Amino acid sequence: MMKRLAKYPLFALFAAMVVGLFAADLLTPSRGFSQMENRYLATRPALTWRSVKEGAFMDRFEEYTNDQFVLRDAWISLKSVAETLCGKVENNGVVIGADGYLFDKNLTTNTRQLTRNRDHVAAFGAGHAEQPVTFTLIPSSYAVLPDKLPCGLQNVDELAVIQNLYAGLREVAVCDVAPVLLAGGGEDMYYRTDHHWTSAGAYAACSAYVEQQGVEPAALGSVALRHTVDGFYGTYYSKVKRVGIQPDTIVWYDIPVRGVQIDGQEVSGLYDLSKFDERDKYAAFLHSNNGLTVIRAAEEPKGEPTRILLVKDSYGNSYAPFLALYYDEVYVVDLRYASGLSDLLEQVSFDEIHILYGFSSFASDTNVFKLNK
């Protein structure tokens, strides 16, 4: 047998690699979460007659083996090095721009879902005509930083789509934050390695919102302590693993509050500071995504408290703390983790309601219908 294998060394080597990798896969414990990719990994699917008959088992098992492949992180890093050496400027839906910026490759928009969600917002506004309701869409970083994009990239013109969507909404007010994000080129408004806006972007947008409500924006230096956290590699980096990309610095503001409650439980402050020591540092803002968060401003209200309801996606996590500078109570709802708004609106009276979404998530989110549930 050994003599026969010696005649076909490449076959023997390939067979040894297959057997070795198979054995290593069996001996390597499964991981629940990938810090490098910043996502949960597929787990071993249950083997049932129904799952085999319907074909679901093999699909899930293939996903499981891909996610749990031995030395997965090392292979991903090797792939990134090879693509960098080849000069490739796109990987896994992310394009590499100038000055270390990473962007979405967004060639199409889910127009059907976008229209549905616009209609949900319109229906909500029509059903709550007695309350001021304001709607904001946040453009992606590539729309605000076009000079950083590689030549020839034909991404969706988000700014134009947003304006068209605003023009079709009569039932709610709109707060267009694109001008303040575009001011000065927008370089400080978004992270280079992550899809979210920075605290500077969130503060600029919040200032635009309160100005629209007739309130003078607060000067942050006089009301909050500024802190920085280095070494942030965001969602774009987790997809592309580009060699040589420098990490972002997170800036956060210690805004004084009386208390923060998440889904009925008191938590310590506006930020989960332990997350700043992990890879997904943006999760520190407002303790990441939760169904209902209630922020109570630092000063005890002398009369009936002013209240705002913020309905948001993850962009709102770094935005909501700034609202505590202007309102006694800030209620924050993420419809992905909440059953709806009707119970809350029956129990609490709000002075204002602000619906705030990133454009990309609003165009694909299937939970916006819960505005009217």
Image (cartoon, helix red, strand yellow):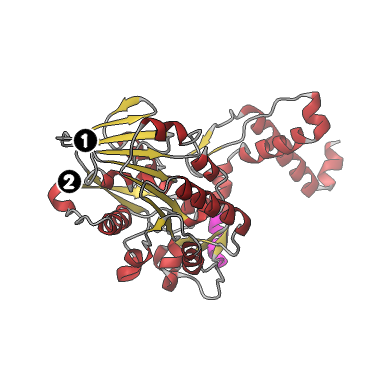
Q: Main secondary structure of the magenta part?
A: helix
Q: Position of residue 119 (x, y in %)?
A: 55, 53
2 sits left or right of 242 in the view: right
- Which amino acid lies under the numbered mark 2 shown in the image of this protein? Leu
Q: Position of residue 58 (x, y in %)?
A: 76, 36
- The residue located at (32%, 65%) in the rendering is 180
Q: Which residue is mark 2?
A: 225
Residue 360: numbered disc: none
Q: Which residue is mark 1?
A: 304
- Which amino acid lies under the numbered mark 1 shown in the image of this protein? Glu
**Please, which residue is most extreme toward the front here?**
130
- The residue located at (44%, 34%) in the rendering is 291
Quadrant in which the N terminus appears: top right
Q: Callout 1: 10 Å neighbours few (<14), some, many (20+)? A: few
Residue 67 in sight in this render: yes
8 or 343, which is in the foreground? 343
Magenta stretch encompasses residue 85:
yes
Residues shaded magenta: 80-88
54 sits left or right of 147 in the view: right
- The residue located at (38%, 30%) in the rendering is 347
The mark total stands at 2
Q: Position of residue 191 (x, y in %)?
A: 38, 56
- The residue located at (45%, 36%) in the rendering is 341
Magenta stretch encompasses residue 360:
no
